Image: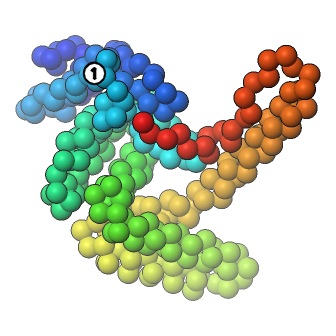
Amino acid sequence: MPFHQDAAATEPLTAIQLVQRTKRCFQLAQPIYYRPDAASAIVRIAAHDLSAGLKNNSTDLASVPTWMWGLIASYGRQTAPALLHDQRMAACSHLPPEEALRRRRVDDEEFRRALLDTGVAALRARLMWAGVSAQAYLEHSRGRGLLLAASVGVGALAFIAASWLAAAGAGPMPLAGAVLLTAVLCLVWIRDWPVVAVLVPAFALFSPFLAAAAVGSLLLWLCEAGWWAVSKPLTKDPSPPPVVGPLTRTPHP
């Protein structure tokens, strides 16, 4: 276990003390420590200042978009690696964009290795790595981040369309075209080609399930809203109106 409770990195991590401040924001109450192997330096993951505000002084743990919570949770085995990565991201936030992107490549790979060390399956760790790698572009070079998102979207849509055509009897050519398009998109992104190579098939494969989760969440909200509307006149102290479950965006402080 590369995460430890003590500064000497002799006591394995047994507890992460978090204070929940808002729906999505937590503060680390006590520091934890990271040492991937005996030859590495010990990294202190500092506690947040519990007496200060939340801006740049909190974490949302693993920054998984709410519409993907059904596949990857924001906490669990990934909690300690997420806290480590949050600290690295905070350090990168003060760097010039190109330097920040170079540094993020190192930090994102460290995040992937830490996920593996805490028992996260290799494929899921790679998906989470690809997600934070794409997020790095959106944070430090928004234009290129949007282009990367568009590249992934185009590739995923090509695979989805090719799958439908193949099922309709069009043969293997549509799928071959989708693979070729994805290869071209990977070449466009040069050294970041693995990010595209991971995210394109992932979104193509999981998009139906993500869409089903979104529909289910909306259906639950409709039932909640209907019940709330009917019961409100009959309740002395009615509750606030319901919101659309995990699809709602909780604004950061």
| Residue 110, visible in the rendered structure | no
* Residue 189 sits in quarter: bottom left
Residue name at image x 87 percent, y 19 percent = 235
Answer with left or right where residue 178 lies relative to residue 105. Answer: right
Which percent across, then down, holds residue 148?
A: 39, 68
Residue name at image x 86 percent, y 27 percent = 232
Q: How many marks?
A: 1
Which percent across, then down, holds residue 54?
A: 36, 30
Which sits in the foreground, 147 or 172?
A: 147
Which quadrant of the figure contains the C terminus?
A: top left
Answer with left or right where residue 253 lies relative to residue 164. Answer: left
Which quadrant of the figure contains the N terminus?
A: top left
Q: Residues within 10 Å of mark 1 (few under 14, many from 20)?
A: some
Which percent across, then down, holds residue 238?
A: 79, 22
Which percent across, then down, holds residue 61?
A: 40, 34
| Amino acid type, residue under disc 1 in the picture | Asp
| Residue 232, visible in the rendered structure | yes
Q: Is residue 172 above or below residue 88?
A: below
Q: Is residue 171 above or below residue 14?
A: below
The secondary element bearing badge 1 is classed as: loop
Which residue corresponds to mark 1? 49
Residue name at image x 51 percent, y 37 percent = 73
Residue name at image x 38 percent, y 81 percent = 184
